[in-house]
Structures are given as structure tokens and as C-alpha cells.
Amino acid sequence: MNPHEKPLILVTNDDGITAPGIRALIDMMNEIGDVYVVAPDSPQSGMGHAITINSTLFCEKIRIDDGPQKDREWACSGTPVDCVKLAITKILPRIPDICVSGINHGSNSSINVIYSGTMSAAVEAGIEGIPAIGFSLSDFSYSADFYAAKEFIQKIVRESIEKEMPKGMILNVNIPKLPKEQIKGIKACRQANAVWKESYDERKDPRGRSYYWLTGEFVNLDKGEDTDENALSEGYVSVVPIQYDMTAHHFISDLNQWDL
């Protein structure tokens, strides 16, 4: 990046382009660089790394507020990953210096990173060699205070740009549900070993057909003090570096001993 020009920042999410979380993130990023927004036109939570291949995609310019990015926003009919792909190949004037996704309504710590559309958008940017960060707030309320962690969000983004993260590296940032003055700081962490104990609530529609609602309980199996779950419980913003290489490198030598 030319040190004399503002960084080009791609902003996306999975809650939809009108969600309060992304509007707050756009506002924060406007203070750092030139912002382009390509985000879903409707909620896409839990989409993971899904892409659209069996239907058409629409991506229309939209104006929601009068911020500096007002003429650089597009609403996409596809998934969060579709948004990043379209942004890079069709919309942005050049490869962005960083992609930020969020701020998500609800935590994406621990195992939730697998299901998260917010994080998958960031991972897609990482696949393209773009530094990327996913931001999530541990608060599902529509009136959640996304500005409580503004100082920390901007600090992480600025550091990520200045330090030039390695290619393929993505940061999963989670913010505790606390007032600004109670957030203690930032902790670099590992992903906690936790699971969802799930079940399906079976019900009947008016015609007597069964339908199902997914329910579940989040269970943290990890008592380590270096995890994202522990950091959040202690009032810190957690930062977990992740990558899209899912190879279990430590098992390759064992696998070579199998009678294959």
C-alpha cells in the first residue's frame, strides 16, 4: 500500500446491509480509510462458506446514509462469501488493503467460527490473500451497543494494516457484552474446545405435517485460561488468529503408518 494514500477497506457482514452492527462498523472504518460496502440484502446468519451456484445473483447500488461511503455501497442477493467474491472481481477499483466483516449480532467464538457467515466472509478474503478480520459482539439484542468497543476495533484494524498480516491469516475478534468502561482490553487467544449439544423441537403444522426447529445448548469443555471463551468471561476482547488450511498436520505421520 502506498503510505501516502488511505487504505481501501471492504466492509461486509452476514446480518444484512441495514443491520446496526455493519452500520456502526462502516462508521468506524470511515475514520481509517476509503470504505466500500458489499453486503447481503437480507440476513444470512449461519450460512458458513456457502456460495450461490444454482440461481442468479443480483448486486445493486444502494444508499442508506450520508457517510463518506454513501456512493460506494452495494446490496447483494447472495451469501456473505458471494459478497466478497463479487466485490473483488466486479466492484472494487483494486484489491482492498483489508476486509472487515461484522459487527455480528452474537458471539462467533470457539466452534461458532465454523458456522458463521461473518467469519466465512473474512476467510474468503483471506483465501484471496487479503488481510481480513471478523468482528462479533456477544449480544443478540437489536439495540446492542456496538460502539462500546470502538477504540479496540479501530486499534486492531490499524495494527493489522500497519503490521501487514501474513497471507491467509484471518483474525476472529469477539467482544464481550459490557459497557465501554468495563472492557479491560484485548487478549490474543486460542479457540476454546466447545460444542453445541443440539436437538430438534418437533411440531405439527395445520395439515398435520411434522416440522422442526433446531435448538441447542452451548457447552464449553475447555478450562484453559488462554482461550477466547475465558477472555470474554473476564471482560476482554478476544482475538484468535485462524487460517483456512484445515490439514491436521500432526496426524500425517500416523496416517502414513496405516495399511493404505
Image (tube, rainbow, N blue to C red):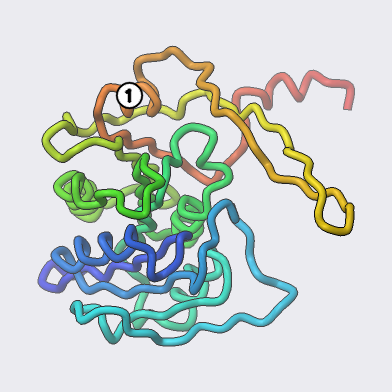
Residue displayed at 68% across by 22% down: 253
Query: Label 1: few (<14), some or many (≥20) within 10 Å?
Result: few
The residue that disc 1 covers is 233
Q: Is residue 170 at all visible to an observer of this figure? A: no
31 horizontally vs 43: left or right: left
Q: Which amino acid does label 1 sit on?
A: Ser
Q: Position of residue 71 (x, y in %)?
A: 28, 86
Q: Where is residue 89 in the image (x, y as percent from the top left)?
A: 49, 78
Q: In which quarter of the image is residue 88?
A: bottom left
* Quarter in which the N terminus is drawn: bottom left
210 horizontally vs 123: left or right: right
How many marks are shown on the rendered structure?
1
Residue displayed at 19% across by 61% down: 28
Residue displayed at 16% across by 63% down: 32
Q: Where is residue 232 in the image (x, y as percent from the top left)?
A: 32, 29
Of 80 and 213, which appears nearest the observer?
Answer: 213
Q: Is residue 56 at all visible to an observer of this figure? A: yes
144 up-or-down from 196: above or below: below
146 up-or-down from 184: above or below: below
Badge 1 element: helix
25 horizontally vs 247: left or right: left
* Quarter in which the C terminus is drawn: top right
Q: Quadrant of residue 218?
A: top right
Residue displayed at 23% across by 55% down: 161
Q: Where is residue 62 in the image (x, y as percent from the top left)?
A: 38, 85
Q: Most extreme residue toward the front, as rendered?
A: 206
